[in-house]
Amino acid sequence: MPMTALIVDDEELAREELKYLLDTTGSVDVLAEGKNGVEAVDLIRTHHPDVVFLDVQMPGLDGFAVLRKLLDLGEGGHLPQIIFATAFDQYAVRAFDVNAIDYLLKPFDRDRVLQAVDRARLRLQESAETKPADLRVDTLLKLIEQHQTPRAHSGKIVLQSGSRLLLIDQKDICFASIDEGVISVVTPTLEGQSKCRTLEELFDLLDPAVFWRAHRSYLVNINHIREVVPWFKSTYQLRMDDKKQTEIPVSRAQTRRLRELFNL
């Protein structure tokens, strides 16, 4: 019986390449594809695949955040086999090579994909015999915790503006936004792009006491909020102090946090 799988990657070419390689095995049935972490959570809960090929760095939720979200939703006992995919050697660390976890480096190598498929199939057989669900959850939790270990926050952030690489103080950042995988960072005097792939990755470099995820697509510096604007149906927008006085939506999930911040 073919092993069922999902492919989740924000790069369409990467999804197509991996699906082609999996199709050539004749033993993997790709049920669906997703392009971000939010879709990954929904697809996993809908299809309950045997294995998920999961990109590490994606807009919205990265690969680690997907696992954390599934665990928070009580899906720990029903987790599929996870095979991480990444273009960066720094993620291909020994920590991935643990129970129920594997990794693939991009561009994909057919032999390595076949090896990962064989390992996933073997683990499925072992799980059916020994049912080590608790061990798998503990392993995943430890891996996520290692990934999320707090780091010292650098005072400088690198931005690309045209052909220039600029070092700016994080206190000067008004807000950052993500659109189609590109992160733009705005200060009162300039705008540039971050090399980070996700807002979560950028957030890791910033002071969490000052920066706030007001919306899934926006990260704001609370010291650069010029005005809180009441919006329809008890929602709010933030008017920032950049040149354009950009208005940023506050998600419903973050409305309570906004009220706590400013005693609204």
Image (tube, rainbow, N blue to C red):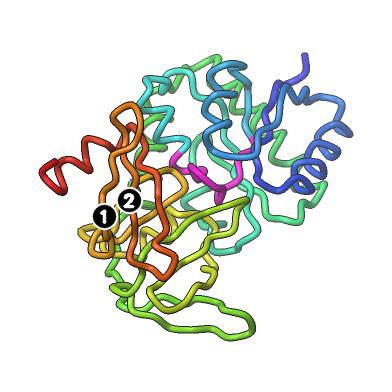
Quickly name the residue at label 1. 227
Rendering coords of residue 210 (x, y %): 23, 61
Seen as rendered, the residue at the extreme left is: 263
Magenta-colored stretch includes residue 1: no
Quickly name the residue at label 2. 238
Q: Residue at x 58, y 17 (%)?
A: 48
Magenta region: 53-65
Q: Nearer the viewer, residue 76 or 246?
A: 246
Quarter of image, res 88: bottom right
Rendering coords of residue 5 (x, y %): 69, 26
Type of amino acid at the residue the image marks with label 2: Leu
Dot label at residue 242: none
Rendering coords of residue 54 (x, y %): 60, 40
Quarter in which the N terminus is drawn = top right
Q: Nearer the viewer, residue 100 or 241?
A: 241
Q: Residue at x 41, y 32 (%)?
A: 69
Q: Nearer the viewer, residue 86 or 15?
A: 15
Q: In the figure, 248 relative to 210: above or below?
A: above
Q: Residue at x 33, y 26 (%)?
A: 233
Left or right: residue 243 versus residue 236 is right
Quarter of image, res 117: top right
- In terms of secondary structure, where does tag 2 sit? strand
Q: Around disc 2, counting alpha carbons within 10 Å, would you say few (fewer than 14), some (14 to 19), or many (20 or more)? A: many
Magenta-colored stretch includes residue 55: yes
Tell me how far mark 1 sits from mark 2, CA to CA.
6 Å
Kindly indicate whether the residue at mark 2 contacts the one at mark 1 (C-beta within 8 angstroms): yes
Label located before the other in sequence (1 or 2)? 1
Type of amino acid at the residue the image marks with label 1: Glu
Q: Nearer the viewer, residue 198 or 252?
A: 252
Count the labels in the image: 2
- In terms of secondary structure, where does tag 1 sit? strand
Q: Residue at x 71, y 25 (%)?
A: 32
